[in-house]
Structure formats: C-alpha cells, structure tokens
Image: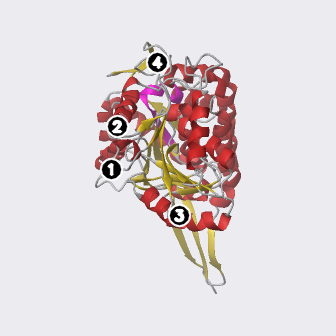
Amino acid sequence: MTTLSCTSPIDGSVFATRETLGPDAARAAVAETRAAQADWAARPLQERIDLVMAGVAAVGAMNDEIVPELAHMMGRPVRYGGEFGGFNERASYMAEIAAQALADTEVSDDAAFRRYIRRVPQGVVFVVAPWNYPYMTAINTVAPALIAGNAVVLKHATQTLLVGERMARAFHAAGVPEAVFRNVFLTHDTTSALIAEGAFDFVNFTGSVGGGQAMERAAAGTFTGLGLELGGKDPGYVMEDADLDAAVDTLIDGAMFNSGQCCCGIERIYVHQSLYDAFVEKAVALVRGYRLGNPLDPETTLGPMAHARFAAEVRAQIAEALEMGATAHIETFAQDDGGCYLTPQILTNVTHDMRVMRDESFGPVVGIMPVRDDAEAIELMNDSPFGLTASLWTSDIDRAAQVGDAIETGTVFMNRADYLDPGLCWTGCKQTGRGGALSVIGYHTLTRPKSYHLKKVTT
C-alpha cells in the first residue's frame, strides 16, 4: 500500500491522508462491482433515476461541510459557495432527458419483422476525476453512467482526496448499492494495470495531456472505450461591436476565477484594435481590485493555487514572457508569498512565441493582443494545439456563427464564457481530447448500440 497525502495550499499542512488499495485488493473490488452491475441495470430506469437524484440531494445536504473542505484541499474561497449548483443542474438535466435519450430507436414493426436499436450500458465505467472542480466534473459522468445502468468506479485526484468518499457516502445513504458505485484510492501503477487488464468497459479521464496519453497507453490493445478531456488554452475574441463592459467583466472573470484553474478558463484574449486600449484599461482596474488571501476568509476573492508546483509553472511562464518583451500590468500583491499565493497578472505586448500564449497556464494570468479583423483573430485562435471552448463577443449572432464555424474548438460561446451547458455536448478537439460528455451524446458515450432483428412466425 501507498499513502496518499493532500497538502493544503492554505498553509502547506497535510490536510488528509488515505491508504491505496494494493493490486489484488483493487482487482477484487472491481470484480465485485462488475458482479453487481447486471442487477443494477435490470432495475427500472425510473428507479435508477430516483436513487441517483437522491444521492445528489444527499451531497447537497453536506454542502456546509463541503465548502470549507474544498477551500482546505484546493484553495477556492468559501465566498463562492462550492459546486452544488452546477452539480445539481447537470445531474438533474441528465435525469430529465434519460428516458428519451435511452429509448429504443424503432426501425420497423410490421407483419414480418420487428427491428430496433437499443442502448445498453457499457458495463463498468471508471471515472478518473480532477481536483479543480472535483464534484462537477465527476457528476458529468457518474450521474448518466449510473442512470444508464452502468456500475461506476470513481478515483479522485490526490489534491481533493475526500471528494470521492463524500460522493460515495451520499449515494450509498440514498440507496445506491455500495458495489454499484465504488470510490477507490489507487496508485498510478495500479490504475494503469487495471486498465491494461481490461478491468473496465469505459474510462473517463479529465486531466493533463500527459495523463491522457498514459491512459491511452494503458488501454492499448484492450479496445476499452476512452473519454478524454485534457488541456486547454481557450481564447476570447472581442469584436468592434461588442458590449465592452460585459466583455471585460466576463472574460477577466473567466481568466481569474478559481485562481485560473478552470478547464474552460480564458487563457488568451484578442481584442479588435479599436477597443483594445479601453479593454486593457478596464481589465487592469478590475484585477487590481481582487483580494488575494486565505480562502476561509469570506472577504477573499482570489485564493491560493492548489499546489506550489502549479504556481511555479505560472510564474515561469510570466517571467519568460517578460524577458521576451511582454508588459505586466499588475503590481505584486502584498499577499504573494512566492508559493501558492500568486498575484494575478495581465500581460500585453505578447506574441505566440511566448509559452504564456501557447502552453496551458491553468493559473491567474492572461495575455491580451490587438487584432485587425476576424481573419487575424481566427488565425490566432486556431494557432494552438488545444481546442475546448472559444468565447466570441459581438452583437451579430450570424457573424459569431460564421466565425465559430472557422474555429477549431469543441464549444463556441457568444457573449459568455466559462460555462458548461448540460444540454450541449461537452467535447474538445486536437490535444484537448476526444469523446463527449453530457447531453444526449453523453448517454451515447456511456452506452453501446445493440440491434434487434426479430423475424415473426407467420401461419
């Protein structure tokens, strides 16, 4: 066994530890889950929906404990109230559409044949969830997977070590069998071994590009389905007819909220040259008003980054950009300790030769560049190995759709950013990954089609 430790970014203390399962114990646990899956799938759909939603409500009942616990584990300020709003919204939507999304596709039913396609569960779904939005990212797969009749094994990031335990406790108390929804603590080696042995029928991973590559290597030759949401470098583009104040407020919040640690956070902004100076001025004034500090303090608006090594990467990208000629607009905050507590930064005079405009930063920094027109903005937005979301700001919906058609991305936003709509497929392209979560497509991902061609006996 190996001991996993969550080090709190608040003060560097060890907040929680857990022992991992050894390889044999992990295999036995997954085998028990596989054995329980068929009985779960045989239950009526509405019964599964009701049990899952009862589990969701039980998580909500824990929210007063969850919010400070998250602050201790990954640094999000308590003033923002946790994740239950999005957690509940996503699960509720998937419950609402389940009957329609999982309904048989009727092809024909005549005197000679009945033909239809049925969606059947994949089997055992392995969810490897990240630390930045640990409840919301997990529920994206956990809720529809269970509703569709799968059994679920959940493994959470070490930084948010207690989240999976809480989710499992809530769902078990609501009546979901323990074997059907299982939280596990595993080493990377045991995780890879289980995947390589074909222990799971589908694996959903949210994390780094390197982590996704490790998942693909482990699954090679097993034909295990993979859903991968990996890195991002999401752009915002402010056109000359945009609502400037709304664009500043939303894009800068999208860049800085959660200390910039958002899957679809804004990491680079392109502004039409006619609005550029005004945009930068307003953005700088907004960020200078942030309060960096202890996330347990309700007055704090920007907490520490989740780990010192994450903050070190952001500092390195900023330093390299400054050496290459970029301009930093935010003076170092007094609370910046050189570790997890990091001054938010706005950079101008940036180029795509700089890592801060090319590599994922995943921190409170954003580069802003002026552009002449849509063509230049499209070229710059597509000049990235990633493609998760893009945020377009204009009063012309047809123009936004046309620009959106030209962008290599998974989601196109107009006049908003950094939001996951459960009615739409959550997906990416290029190194951001593959597959789709939520929406009807999320159910298609978590099930497989099974065709029925039934010849009737006629006399």
The amino acid on which the numbered mark 1 sits, given as a three-letter code, is Glu
For residue 75, above or below residue 227: above
Q: Is residue 154 a member of the stretch shown in magenta?
A: yes
Q: CA distance from mark 2 to mark 3?
A: 45 Å
Q: Relative to 165, say whether 359 is above or below.
A: below
Task: Specify which label sits upstream in the sequence, 4 or 1.
Answer: 4
Q: Amino acid at mark 4?
A: Ser
Helix, strand or loop at mark 1:
helix
Disc 2 marks which amino acid?
Answer: Thr
Label 4 belongs to which residue? Answer: 8
Comparing marks 2 and 3, which lies closer to the viewer?
Answer: 3
Instruction: Find disc 1 in the rendering and name its residue.
Output: 216
- Residue 322 in picture, x, y percent from top left: 36, 36
Marks 4/1: CA–CA distance: 31 Å
Residue for badge 3:
374
Residue sitting at x 56%, y 49%: 276
Of the residues under marks 3 and 1, which one precedes in the sequence? 1
> Mark 3, mark 1: which one is toward the viewer?
3
- Of the two numbered discs 2 and 3 on the same chain, state the one appearing first in sequence: 2
Mark 4 or 1: in front is: 4
The residue carrying mark 2 is 191
Sequence order check: which comes first, mark 2 or mark 1? 2
Q: Earlier in the sequence, mark 3 or mark 4?
A: 4
Residue pictured at 62% horizontal, 66% vertical: 399
| Secondary structure at numbered mark 2 | helix
Distance between mark 2 and mark 1 Cα atoms: 12 Å
- In this picture, residue 31 sits left or right of residue 400: left
Span of residues in magenta: 152-164
Q: How many marks?
A: 4
Question: Helix, strand, or loop for circle 4?
Answer: loop
